[in-house]
Amino acid sequence: MFGLFEQPAASRQDHSACSGCSLCVLVCPMWRARRDPRFSPEGLAKALQCGATVAELAAPLDACSLCGACDPVCPERIDLSGMVMALRGALPRAAELDSQLTNLARQAASAAAPVAGALLLPGADLRANPALLARTQMLLGYGLAQDDGADIALALETGAQVSPTRRRRFLDRVEGRTLIVGDGLLLAALRRWLHGVRLQSLGEALSSQVAIRRRLTSADFYVIETRAYHAEFERLVTYYDRLRLETGCALNLDLQRIAIPAMTQAMSRRREMLADEDLREARWMLKGRQPRRIVVESLADRAVFEKSCDVPVLHLAELAED
Amino acid sequence: MHFGACVVGSEGFDASPGYDSLHSFHRMVLLKISLVEPGTVGPCPVAPDALQGIKRQQTNPARWKGAGWQAFVSALDAAGMELVEGAAACGVYATDAGGTAYGLPHGVVVARSAGQIASLLKAAQTHRVPVTVRGGGLTTEGESVAFGGVLLDMSGMSRVLHIDAKALTVRVEGGIFWHSLAEELRREDLDYLSAPLNLTSSVGGTLGVGGIDVNSARLGCSADQAIALQVVTPTGEIVECSDSQNQELFQRVILGYGQFGVITEATLRVRPYTPLSMHYFYYSSLATAIEDLQMLDRNDASDYSGILTIMDCAVNLLVAFDSDEREAAFKANWESRLRGYGEFGFALCMLGHYALRPWKLTEALYLLQRKREVFPEFRRAEYMRQGKMHDRTVVFSRAVWKHWGSRQMVIPDLATSADKFVAAVERGNAVCRKYFPRYTLYCVGIKLRPEHQAHYEMSCVPPDATGWAYGCEFEPIIDGEVYSRDHFQAFKNAIYDIGVDMGASYYRFGGMMKGYIRRVFGDALVDKHLALKRKADPAMILNRDVIF
């Protein structure tokens, strides 16, 4: 387990290396909701080893939220999230999704070149909330990228192809800068694509701010955004452990220090109503805990907690004094 | 000859009759084929005499042919039960943690309720369809692999039903992983008593075989923690049982290797959660380390104790405590009696040892590398608070999978009474040395409960043990090497032969090792249990070929 600790990302393996230890099952929200091994990374890998077709795996592939919890616990260092993303590419895509990708790509093409210096790439959820975006930008003091790679993030999630030209154009605009990235999947991809660039998740960047950190207390339940956390687990497990020690806040970590996701649906289905499994997951996180406030890094998680408990739910950026 | 395809004992070795032995020896050296003891697989595994001397006690059972399968499927369908077939559903169960037994079921049922399992078993009896029950799939001898028939996946029943924090008990579904139980208990500041150091062992599976922890010398095996069970019998009755209710069934299901029923619910003892204070002592003698381990156990001097070897000359005795008081008492009364060294003292010892033996440089480097890789795992900052280790099972399990885990795991074991243990372990260690360049031994004591004597019949607990039984697992470090099944089987047989010779028992005597059952337990006891099995399971469908 945790073979990722000392291994560079390049050494990660494919599904054929799965030995069936089930460690990924323990942390998989998709499995927790269904208790059916087909709905787990191990189920997918083993089915592929035994000759299952991608079409036969459509249901679990669609259900996976790509929270990335499985990646750091795999002792064989299989790129399980990458496996899901690649397999999704072989599934037929809804026309609605294609048109969404086209719209995002069009917006990116017409975006102005970013200002010089460090950049904030807010991601779709934060961009949809202009007031919070402005507050976040003010707190961080970074320039805002009009082209934040939202089309690339969605393509990664859905397994769609990104044209090399589009990718190159995007990378040219951000290369060599310090970047704060709101989308966890895009952040992980940028780590693979860019070298020598300082990259941080939005959660880490905001929680590092003194104005925010000093407002966290032992009465808070702090919800880490899972994708960014698991993509750089080895470093961030130490970072958040320190945050917990310094502030006394409780974290959405299980005993393996894996982050439990609140939002368990794939992004393509998030526009739909919250599912029972999301609410169950949030209630599981809060079981045995009585926080007076919930602080989330991701706006997607805020909706789940607002519906499943009656304590105030704040985004991290809302924590700093005005 | 295809050099790339040649492995130890591989069927791919292209030998011609009459090859000369010197040439063969040179080829073995070139190919890094290890020499094995006479009577096991020779240099050419397809030579006419290749199988001579291999006491292959058991191989994979033949696949069930499927007679009556369609009628069985129709019966389940009529009962509204979901049974899934095909690669996407069955592939996940192709092997177990051992990775040497391979088989596929005809179909899979994910457990949802005792009632559903009762219907399944009734239909299976009627249509004579084998049912293989799987929890975490952490068997090593193919016990949880289905060679045809239906596989019942218990992970579908994996919830905590009720925690009684006052009475310190918990009621769980049988398929729950111990780790999932720990997650729930921690929210109430509780912990289970003892469980295997593996996150994905299931409660039901463990109660059926034993379950050894590093606190078993004090608290007994996991199966001893069960107060009551809900069991679905092989003929489909749902029965609550305990030491006071349906006692005979309880005695047979606990440590019964899944032969007498499916555990659908269990009530277990639990305890307040505590972090651990860990101490490590290092020995260059296995026998001395075992003697010290047994001295600690006899005197109730520690809360946790166990031995893990790195090499024959580097043996680690782990001692840990739940409370400062117990730790202080150990330091005052027992620590000075241990003959092991601290880390620094042992490093100096090893330095001296290898300075006088420069030709053993490779061995010294391996020891150093193992220390550098493994030790930090037990001291990760996020699991340590004020010098105490939190969530020990996560820490241990992570280390086990990372440093001992492999796509194939072969872990023969010996369980003996206290007085036979040193000799058994030393003999087993000598077998390891013959078969593998690197291996690890894990030794631990198991406190026996006199009132549970009936549970222990025909189990891993040796019949002559009183007070404590001791278990040792012999695990080769495979580490990317490829060995044939014959090599593994010969190794396991050589270990198990020691058990027969010494009147010991085994933890893993089912599946591929079941050929040892009569030899070690004797005909009278085995026939008694076989008669009970035939009565309880007329069509012999439940976990066929695991024991009977």
Image: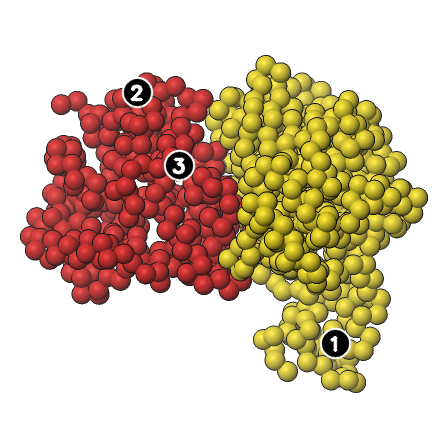
Chain colours: A red, B yellow
Distance in Å between CA atoms under marks 2 and 1 = 71 Å
Residue occupying the point 33% across, 46% down: A266
Q: Residues within 10 Å of mark 1 (few under 14, many from 20)?
A: some
Question: Looking at the image, is mark 2 or mark 1 nearer the viewer?
Answer: 2
Q: Which residue is mark 2?
A: A311
Q: Let me know if marks 3 and 2 both belong to one chain.
A: yes
Q: Residues within 10 Å of mark 3 (few under 14, many from 20)?
A: some
* Among numbered discs 3 and 2, the one appearing first in the sequence: 3
Can you see residue A26? Answer: yes
Identify the chain of the residue marked 1, using the numbered disc in the image: B
Identify the chain of the residue marked 2, using the numbered disc in the image: A
Cβ atoms under marks 3 and 1 closer than 8 Å: no
Q: Which residue is mark 3?
A: A277
Looking at the image, is B98 positioned above or below residue B400? below
In the image: residue B283, left or right of residue B481 = right
Residue B237: x percent and y percent?
71, 36
Which quadrant would residue B122 be assigned to in this image?
Answer: top right
Q: Secondary structure at mark 1?
A: loop
Who is closer to the viewer here, B70 or A210? B70
Residue occupying the point 68% across, 71% down: B10
Can you see residue B305? Answer: no
**Residue B531's disc number:** none
Residue A287: x percent and y percent?
44, 25
Who is closer to the viewer here, B324 or B1? B1
Residue occupying the point 54% across, 59% down: B86
Distance in Å between CA atoms under marks 3 and 1 = 56 Å
Q: Which residue is mark 1?
A: B46
Residue B182: x percent and y percent?
55, 30
